[in-house]
Image: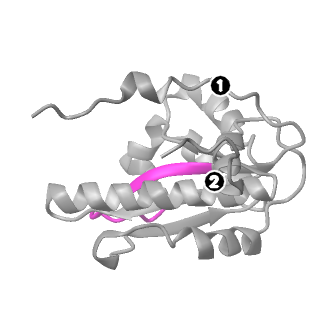
């Protein structure tokens, strides 16, 4: 099969998408927009149709209180820095995953949730809504789980930082697939 020289629209979107970590504008991220994006994002592959995710939205009206509460879980000398960091995005989408009893289903749930997050990132990029999936230490903190009412049989997969942007981050090169590709020689 000959390699196609013309990229499809989907291939272009995948290659153009960037994680937007800062440089957000003041434009408000509306809950309705996030819900619309999630309505399509949840069409990710999910083993057994478990759909192991749920979402917690923190909009601009709750962001300062949220940032202060999460920052308070850090040692005192880091709290000011963490609060400022958590006030940078315009909004957050916290993604929470069901944690099953066996490793196989855990791996399947995590894979499905990661696929759904990637779908969300692509859909947001189309609307020039910046997204970055963060896994800072606080997502593992029991106090943060309590703040967010996350149960024992759930895991915070990440804080999705959200904000509109004017200038897209520069693309970082990828390693050649050929360097990471082999053929089974059994």
In this image, 72 relative to 169: left or right?
A: left
Question: Which residue does the image show at 54% across and 28% down from the upper left?
Answer: 76
Specify the quadrant of the image occupied by residue 155.
Answer: bottom left
Residue 32 % position (x, y): 75, 75
Judge whether 139 appears above or below 52 on screen: above
Residue 125 % position (x, y): 73, 52
Residue 164 % position (x, y): 82, 50
Is disc 1 placed on a helix, strand or loop? loop
Query: What segment carries the magenta color?
Result: 148-160
Based on the picture, tell me whether residue 157 belongs to the magenta stretch.
Answer: yes
Residue 79 seen anywhere in this rendered image of the structure: yes
Question: Which residue does the image show at 57% across and 67% down from the upper left?
Answer: 41
Specify the quadrant of the image occupied by residue 79.
Answer: top right
Judge whether 174 appears above or below 89 on screen: above
- Pointer 1 local density, CA inside 10 Å: few below 14, some 14–19, many at least 20: few
Is disc 2 placed on a helix, strand or loop? helix
> Along the line of sight, which residue is nearer the eye, 48 or 150?
48
> Along the line of sight, which residue is nearer the eye, 76 or 136?
136
Residue 73 % position (x, y): 49, 40
User: What's the coloring here?
Assistant: one colour
Q: For mark 1, what is the residue?
A: 172
> Along the line of sight, which residue is nearer the eye, 177 or 49?
177
Judge whether 168 appears above or below 120 on screen: above
Along the polypeptide, which appears first: circle 1 or circle 2? 2
Question: Which residue does the image show at 71% across and 34% down from the upper left?
Answer: 84
Specify the quadrant of the image occupied by residue 25.
Answer: top right
Q: For mark 2, what is the residue?
A: 121
Residue 155 seen anywhere in this rendered image of the structure: no
């Amino acid at each position: 099969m000959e390699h196609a020289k013309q990229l499809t629209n989907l291939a272009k979107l995948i290659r153009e998408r960037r994680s937007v970590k800062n440089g957000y504008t003041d434009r408000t991220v509306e809950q309705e927009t996030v819900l619309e994006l999630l309505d399509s994002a949840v069409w990710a592959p999910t083993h057994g149709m478990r759909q192991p995710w749920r979402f917690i939205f923190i909009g601009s009206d709750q962001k300062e209180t949220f940032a202060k509460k999460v920052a308070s879980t850090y040692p005192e000398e880091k709290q000011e820095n963490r609060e400022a960091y958590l006030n940078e995005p315009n909004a957050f989408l916290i993604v929470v995953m069901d944690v099953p009893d066996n490793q196989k289903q855990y791996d399947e749930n995590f894979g499905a949730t990661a696929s759904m997050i990637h779908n969300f990132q692509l859909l947001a990029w189309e609307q020039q809504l910046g997204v970055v999936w963060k896994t800072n230490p606080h997502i593992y903190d029991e106090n943060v789980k309590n703040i967010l009412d996350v149960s024992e049989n759930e895991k915070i997969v990440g804080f999705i930082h959200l904000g509109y942007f004017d200038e897209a981050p520069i693309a970082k090169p990828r390693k050649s697939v050929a360097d990471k590709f082999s053929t089974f020689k059994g």
